[in-house]
Image (tube, rainbow, N blue to C red):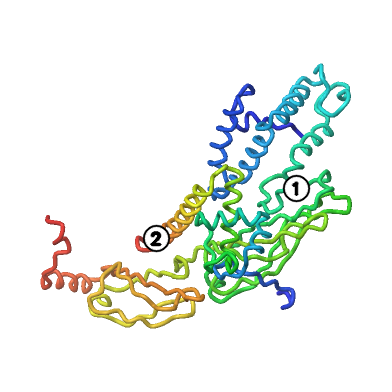
Amino acid sequence: MAAEDDVLSGELVDDTARLDLDELCRICGEPADCLVEMVEAGIIRPEGDRRTVWRFSAVAVMRSRKALRLRRDLDINMAGLAVTLDLLDEVDRLQGELKSLRRQLGQLQD
Amino acid sequence: MQLKDYYAILGVAETASADDIKKAYRQLAREHHPDLNKGDGSADRFKEVGEAYEVLKDPAKRKEYDELRTYGSRQGEASRPPPGQGAGPAGGGLDEADLEDFLQSIFRQRHAGDGAGEGARGRAGPGAARFAIPGEDIHYRIGVTLEDSHAGATRSLSLQTHRFDEAGHVLPDTRNLNVRIPKGVVDGQKIRLKGQGGAGFGGAPDGDLYLEVELLPHARFTVEGRDVSLVLPVAPWEAGLGATVKVPTLGGPVNLAIKPGAQSGQRLRLAGRGLPGPTPGDQYVVLKIVMPKVATDADRALLEQMREQMSFDPRATLGV
């Protein structure tokens, strides 16, 4: 077992909004215009009603990076990215539910 | 090093038009994009497809590639030298240096702007020394048991990554890390360890390490988000007459009251007995009525008595 001070504590990628627009731009390596477009397309949903007070969560970081990769590799436009990401979330959710239900069914049939 | 057949990778003829190449790439990219496919191997296939397209979509690069290909495949008989070089090596074959040069000329530009990417593309080589390249993010899946998610845990990881030496060469690097698994992590959740990804070059920051949690299957519990479910076997008389039974939970056994007249498949909720979190999950108990084995004459007599005395048609709703 490692000594206590050798143990790294990560940050959970969750819904807590911490980053402002500048920080998100820096992390994504994109200009503000691009990320504002993503907000307008509904790809990421910051807290706060004005650009100057927007706060983004770590989930928003993951989402914007995924959107940028898909845009770069598949040439999908903003509206398409919003639909794609929503559908991917839905697929994830349904696959989780399916996995869980299948296992439960297995136990009921044992 | 071997020159890859980019045409075969994209499944197009050497004579394919720019439009056909684009179409083929789009199709394959959709099929193998790691963000759209979780299957193993899709990332490697996508990388290959991306590399092929990177070259073939650009007329100048494609021309250079075609020349290199012709030269290489003719084993030195080519009338033209490879791009950027004098005469080929006597007796032919493809000169390693040509190939490396070519690949670097193609992928260099890409790296300069690709730092925030997922490392799906090639790696920064010595030729990239003039640029400051942020380290790539590393994604790593870790299997976590339900017990570890419930109680929190510390895990030791061994990561294969790379670093740069002073000349800008990429060197493999193995890093051992001890990482705290926070309480209540759920399937698919990511833990970000800042600065623990690939090394940056030229003063650029190191990448981050993302650990994607994969909750491992449990012998008893299934999990969905923070809620856990358990199939609980009960005797027919426990279901019929009601009972208080012991039920395992992640935090240890609890007593559960089953009301008289319970049926198989009925779901009971133990509030807050799932995985911990801002909103702790619940535990669902799904009842499964189990018939005892009829082992003795007395057992048989009991069931016969039920048959005689109870007016019960389990198929009443089937209209038969």
Question: Helix, strand or loop at disc 1?
Answer: helix
Amino acid type for the residue under numbered disc 1:
Ala
Residue B206, located in which quarter of the rendered image? bottom right
Category of crowding for the residue at label 1, using alpha-carbon neighbours closer than 10 angstroms: few (below 14), some (14–19), many (at least 20): some
Q: Nearer the viewer, residue A70 or B273?
A: A70
Residue at point 77%, 47% (across, down): B124
Q: Nearer the viewer, residue A6 or B128?
A: B128
Residue at point 72%, 63% (across, down): B196
Quadrant of image for the C terminus of chain B: bottom left
Residue at point 61%, 41% (across, down): B45
B17 sits to left or right of B116: left
Q: Nearer the viewer, residue B265 or B139?
A: B139
B74 sits to left or right of B21: right
Above or below residue B86? Residue B226 is below
Quadrant of image for the N terminus of chain B: top right
Q: Nearer the viewer, residue B288 or A93?
A: A93
Category of crowding for the residue at label 2, using alpha-carbon neighbours closer than 10 angstroms: few (below 14), some (14–19), many (at least 20): some
Residue B15, located in which quarter of the rendered image? top right
B74 sits to left or right of A110: right
Residue B66, located in which quarter of the rendered image? top right
Output the chain of dot 2.
Answer: A
Residue B1, numbered label = none
Output the chain of dot 1.
Answer: B
Q: Which residue is mark 1?
A: B112
| Residue B224 picture location, percent across and down | 45, 65
| Residue B266 picture location, percent across and down | 30, 70
Q: Which residue is mark 2?
A: A101
| Residue A66 picture location, percent across and down | 58, 53
Amino acid type for the residue under numbered disc 2:
Leu
Q: CA distance from mark 1 to mark 2?
A: 46 Å
Above or below residue B112? Residue A32 is below
| Residue B135 picture location, percent across and down | 74, 56
